Amino acid sequence: MIRPAITWYIHGMPGSTVIPWPLACVAVLAAASSIASGAFEQRQAHAPVHGYQLVKSYPHDRQAFTQGLVYLDGFLYEGTGLHGQSGIRKVRLENGEVVQHRPLDKQYFGEGIAVWGRTIVQLTWQSEIGFVYDLASFEPVKTFGYTGEGWGLTHDGTRLIMSDGTPTLRFLDPGSFEETGRLTVRDGGVPVDDLNELEWVKGEIYANVWQRERLARINPKTGRVTGWVDLTGLLSPIERMGTDVMNGIAYDEKGDRLFVTGKLWPRLFEIRVVP
Ligand SMILES: [Ca+2]
């Protein structure tokens, strides 16, 4: 809205007899001031962008199309996607060794996972079915249904929190899997689309945003994005070859460690968010 106005003044100036020069200059200055204040307001309205400090890097399976990631007692639990390559796995953090694995039938495309009690809950992309497994044995316990797509999953201690690729997060009862509420995620009033893998971190929801190397930090009560974490530069250009998007956040509550990785990424990173 502002830009065409200033363009008009600039284009109107040479040879113009309609707008005297002093008036034109005032108008240009006013428009420029308006742009500056508009930009300032925009910066104020959107959440701040934080950086990161790389703490440590670990091996990650290049064949794992990461859709869900959880840390628990020295191991990562990982849910993978793609038809024929989906499953759940238990991975030793230090060396990336897969110590336990259960494939998902090839008709399903695995998505986010959460560890709830002594179970692992896994979503599927478009099949509208979720799977529950025993945490220790990986044996199937039960299934549940939901409408629409399944993307990311985490929990806040009382509710499962699910994303479906839209700006809306759903809260589910972890016993019945009934939906108990919804939250629309916005940054500066603008809905944030493509919310993907999730993690509950110290009272906030951290979310991957599909195709962006940024984590959103979300207020679970208001849905407001309170900050972004810019994670560009984690993979070297050589490591980047053959990979897909960043996806996968896990938090070690006892050790206060935050881990991130991506689909088909060769590395998994412990990072610290910095102002
Ligand atoms: Ca996670």
Image (cartoon, grey):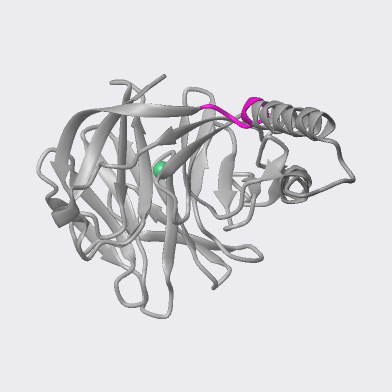
The location of residue 190, given as percent across then percent down, is: 70, 43
Residue at 16%, 37% (x, y): give it.
57
Q: Nearer the viewer, residue 92 or 149?
A: 149
Q: Which residues are magenta?
A: 43-48
Q: Is residue 3 left or right of residue 137?
A: right
Residue at 25%, 42% (x, y): give it.
234
| Quadrant of the rendered image holding ligand 1 | top left
Residue at 73%, 28% (x, y): give it.
29
Residue 3, magenta (yes or no): no
In which quadrant is the C terminus drawn? top left
The location of residue 236, given as percent across then percent down, is: 18, 48
Q: Is residue 196 above or below residue 51?
A: below
The location of residue 60, given as percent across then percent down, is: 18, 50
Q: Is residue 77 above or below residue 272?
A: below
Residue 121 visible in the snapshot = no
Q: Nearer the viewer, residue 205 or 72?
A: 205
